[in-house]
Amino acid sequence: MRLTKLTSHGIRALIYICRADDRRVRVSEIAATLSISQQNAFKVVHMLARAGFVTGVRGRGGGIRLSRPAAEIRIGEIVKAVETTRVEVEDDPHPSPAQDESKGPLNRALDEALEAFIAILDQHTLAEMARAGLNEANILTPSQQDSPSLSGPKLNRNEVARQ
């Protein structure tokens, strides 16, 4: 499963904010640390605030901080708040009467796979990610790939078939 850059930025921004402890973090700090534009950083922070992960204070001495303890914020919850978590493909235009008319078998399978993916992510908290033994640059610096992948390196169809 491939996640969008926005999700990557959101998770990495939350990790950075978490590591700042109780200090308010400025959006310009997040932009510089994550190597993204201030416009993108504002978009990420706005999205995180709307989802209830951060609260902000405007003006001099302002900034953002986590709205609740990092140990209570699940990674799956972040992904659900940022990503489109509905997968749908066109199925058989003439479903059999035994099939649920609203969903074909392929869509049901994709929904189950997505639920399993989110369930695995929900086993991990923001606090775990923030204190991970990884070098800070590995977590906070964007990868060279176009979009982040939680499944490791990108494989082509032939490589997947061999596995």
Image (cartoon, rainbow, N blue to C red):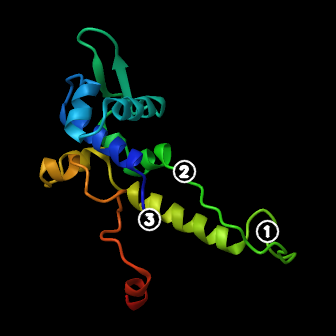
Q: Residue at x 18, y 31 (%)?
A: 20
Q: Label 1 neighbourhood size at 10 Å, few (<14), some (14-19), many (20+)?
A: few
- Distance, label 2 to label 1, CA atoms, is 23 Å
Q: Which amino acid does label 3 sit on?
A: Met
* Residue 100 tag number: 1
Q: Is residue 9 above or below residue 100?
A: above
Q: In this view, does 49 lie above or below 33?
A: above
Q: Residue at x 79, y 68 (%)?
A: 100
Q: Residue at x 13, y 54 (%)?
A: 133
Q: Label 2 neighbourhood size at 10 Å, few (<14), some (14-19), many (20+)?
A: few
133 relative position to 153: left or right: left
Q: Residue at x 35, y 49 (%)?
A: 8
Circle nearer the viewer, 3 or 1:
3
Q: What element carries label 1?
A: loop
Q: Residue furthest bottom?
A: 162
Q: What residue type is labelled 2?
A: Thr
Q: Are marks 2 and 1 in contact (CB under 8 Å)?
A: no
Circle nearer the viewer, 2 or 1:
2
Question: In the rendered structure, which disc, 3 or 2, sits on the residue that comes first in sequence?
Answer: 3
Question: In the rendered structure, which disc, 3 or 1, sits on the residue that comes first in sequence?
Answer: 3
Q: Name the residue under label 2.
A: 84
Q: Is mark 2 on a helix, strand or loop?
A: loop
111 relative position to 52: left or right: right
Q: Where is residue 114 in the image (x, y as percent from the top left)?
A: 52, 62
Q: Is residue 105 above or below residue 75?
A: below
Q: Name the residue under label 3.
A: 1
